[in-house]
Image (tube, rainbow, N blue to C red):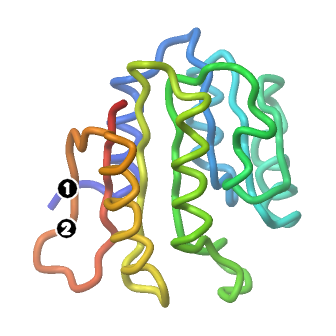
Amino acid sequence: MAGSINTIAHEWMEAILTPNSIVVDATTGNGKDTYFLASRCQKVYAFDIQTQAIVNSQNYNKDFTNISYVCDNHEFINHYVKEEVDLIVFNLGYLPNSNHEIMTTANSTKKALRNSMEILTPNGSIIITSYIGHPGGLEEYHEIHNEAALLQLKLIKTFQYENVSNSPILLHFKR
């Protein structure tokens, strides 16, 4: 069996990143993707709608000075990021070990993808981990595909565990 979905996502990110990359972690959560990105990039914008997630990520990433935190919905990505970015990462769903009522939604993620087009470089990538097993997750996954098609994003690759019901789906889109 392949490694964890996060390990695979990090492998995909590693293939894209350079020390000069400017990236967005659209859902910082507990800060693990933010850590991975900050250790390899020039600058990371780390978004989350929950104050607790921002605090968790700041604590986890306290040694980095190249992270700008934004406590707001990822749908407003273009209100805060005013420079071109090479990669935008979404790890959808809810903050682990927290209120599962607060989670990404099909509507906010669709808007985030649309607004990402204002800041994504012409050859930029979007990597999304979509959790189809939680309420609204499958709808969000379908909306991602619909919006990506409207935005003419190219689906480069996908990963999902075989024979695992409702396993997360990893998506890599290229502009």
Image coords of residue 90 (percent x, y)? 52, 52
Residue shown at 83% from the left, 42% from the top: 69
* Left or right: 161 as drawn, with respect to 85: left
Q: Is residue 21 above or below residue 102?
A: above
Q: Amino acid at mark 1?
A: Ala
Q: Going by the picture, which residue comes out furthest to the front?
A: 150
Q: Is residue 6 above or below residue 64?
A: below
* Left or right: 115 as drawn, with respect to 4: right
Question: Element at badge 2?
Answer: loop
Residue of label 1:
2
Image coords of residue 128 (percent x, y)? 42, 53
Whichever of callouts 2 and 1 sits on the residue coming sooner in the sequence is 1
Q: Quadrant of the C terminus?
A: top left
Residue shown at 36% from the left, 50% from the top: 150
Determine which of the numbered discs, if any, sits on residue 161 in the image: 2
Q: Are marks 2 and 1 in contact (CB under 8 Å)?
A: yes
